[in-house]
Image (tube, grey):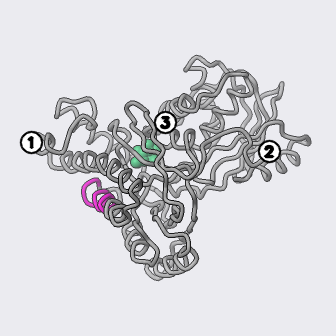
């Protein structure tokens, strides 16, 4: 991450040294897509890329400068309310507001520089990383203890109620709880988290299609409404409580679209456990088969893929060194994730970017090879 850069920009911008550095990673989801808001299972991994904050407490109002986006309007952490800030400052101010709602009235303002090395719009949760980072920052400056899971939950409140996006808990939890070298098998209902080791010679390859996620807000909410309706019709609070057998036995009670959505959620949640078993047994054929089944289901049943994601997944899968590939994140653009053997990475990127470029000459694909990484914290790279 870019902490040293954030510190250098801080000194240039505010004329003194930063006193605190916070880092929060983005995430890639290995499997378990569109299952978190059904209280189901997911398996994200934190990335070695994310948001870095260089900061210093101040007696004046909070002043935030983003390396990518410039200045935000200043605000008082103890006073912000939904609607009182705009744009990217919502993630920072919204966390102060959400912490207050949760009984932690943070009141220490800060001067902050924000640096971000995640590709924006690729579906790797730069907004969740920003929220988690600011959660850590406000709590630390005001002298509250930091509980990573609690920060993740508060970040979800911020996103749902302050920013106004109705997302689940996965992205923030992955950013807050990441473990080096491990994907995280998460039960979103209980928030029991089991780190599952990713074999040492495999890298997580992010293959960004270059197509930005235009439709995502309304389509995401439609999908949510559909699975909530399905759960209500089946008489359960969340689809988490339904097995494949139970769903099929009651299939006739659902409309055709809700049934397709529900079939995806129930099978996808089960695939998360199968993937954990495959990773633990180092069964690479099974990893590949599960990633493919996940992609196909997101394309055909949940209908959140797009031409670029389908092509990228197919090309990524066919290139030498690939164990498996699928779209990752909310869909409608963004990136695929592939598991690739490390020794093949240089040729792999060349092959895949060339083949994808031939299909979509106007899209700028981006490839990032990553190891699963630790979650948010104070000044890792900075020490
Ligand atoms: C987005 C949301 C997550 C999750 C994924 C789909 O990333 O923020 O909560 O629902 O989409 O798995």
* Residue 164: assigned label: 3
Q: Earlier in the sequence, mark 1 or mark 3?
A: 3
Q: Earlier in the sequence, mark 1 or mark 2?
A: 1
Vertical comparison of 103 with 75: above or below:
above
Is residue 73 visible to us here? yes
* Residue at x 41% of width, y 65% of height: 325
Crowd band around label 2 with a 10 angstrom C-alpha radius: few (<14), some (14–19), many (20+): few
Q: Which residues are magenta?
A: 293-302
Crowd band around label 1 with a 10 angstrom C-alpha radius: few (<14), some (14–19), many (20+): few
Q: What residue is pinned by disc 2?
A: 383
* Residue at x 63% of width, y 50% of height: 50
Residues 338 and 34: in front is: 338
* Residue 249: assigned label: 1
Is residue 217 visible to us here? no
Q: Earlier in the sequence, mark 2 or mark 3?
A: 3
Residues 42 and 163: in front is: 42
The reply to whether the magenta stretch includes residue 26 is: no
Residue 119: x and y in percent read 59, 58
Residue found at the very far front of the displayed protein: 281
* Residue 43: assigned label: none
Task: Tell me how far mark 1 sits from mark 3, CA to CA.
Answer: 37 Å
Please identify, in this view, whether the residue under mark 2 or under mark 3 is nearer the observer.
2
Dot 2: what SS? loop
Dot 3: what SS? loop
Residues 210 and 33: in front is: 33
Q: Quadrant of the C terminus?
A: top right
The answer to whether 321 appears left or right of 288 in the picture is right
Vertical comparison of 87 with 110: above or below:
below
Residue 199: x and y in percent read 49, 59
């Amino acid at each position: 991450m870019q902490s040293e850069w954030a510190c250098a920009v801080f000194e240039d911008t505010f004329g003194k040294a930063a006193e605190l550095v916070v880092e929060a990673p983005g995430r890639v989801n290995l499997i378990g897509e569109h299952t978190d808001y059904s209280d189901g299972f997911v398996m994200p991994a934190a990335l070695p890329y994310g948001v870095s904050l260089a900061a210093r407490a101040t007696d004046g109002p909070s002043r935030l400068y983003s390396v990518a986006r410039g200045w935000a309007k200043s605000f008082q952490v103890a006073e912000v309310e939904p609607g009182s800030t705009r744009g990217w400052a919502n993630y920072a101010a919204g966390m102060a507001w959400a912490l207050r709602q949760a009984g932690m009235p943070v009141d220490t303002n800060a001067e902050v520089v924000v640096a971000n090395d995640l590709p924006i719009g690729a579906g790797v949760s730069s907004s969740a990383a920003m929220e988690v980072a600011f959660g850590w920052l406000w709590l630390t400056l005001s002298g509250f203890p930091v509980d990573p899971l609690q920060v993740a939950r508060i970040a979800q409140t911020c996103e749902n109620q302050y920013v106004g996006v109705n997302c689940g808990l996965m992205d923030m939890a992955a950013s807050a709880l990441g473990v080096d070298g491990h994907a995280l098998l998460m039960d979103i209902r209980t928030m029991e988290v089991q780190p599952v080791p990713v074999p040492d010679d495999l890298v997580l390859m992010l293959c960004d299609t270059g197509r930005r996620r235009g439709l995502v807000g309304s389509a995401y909410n439609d999908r949510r409404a559909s699975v909530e309706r399905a759960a209500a019709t089946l008489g359960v609070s969340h689809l988490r409580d339904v097995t494949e057998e139970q769903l099929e036995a009651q299939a006739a009670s659902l409309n055709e679209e809700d049934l397709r959505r529900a079939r995806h959620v129930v099978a996808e949640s089960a695939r998360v456990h199968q993937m954990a078993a495959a990773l633990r047994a180092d069964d690479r054929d099974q990893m590949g088969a599960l990633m493919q089944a996940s992609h196909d289901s997101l394309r055909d049943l949940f209908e959140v893929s797009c031409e670029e994601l389908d092509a990228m997944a197919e090309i990524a899968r066919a290139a030498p060194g690939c164990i498996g590939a699928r779209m990752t994140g909310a869909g409608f653009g963004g990136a695929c994730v592939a598991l690739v053997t490390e020794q093949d990475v240089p040729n792999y990127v060349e092959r895949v970017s060339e083949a994808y470029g031939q299909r979509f000459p106007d899209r700028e694909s981006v490839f990032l090879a990553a190891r699963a990484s630790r979650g948010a914290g104070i000044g890792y790279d900075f020490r």
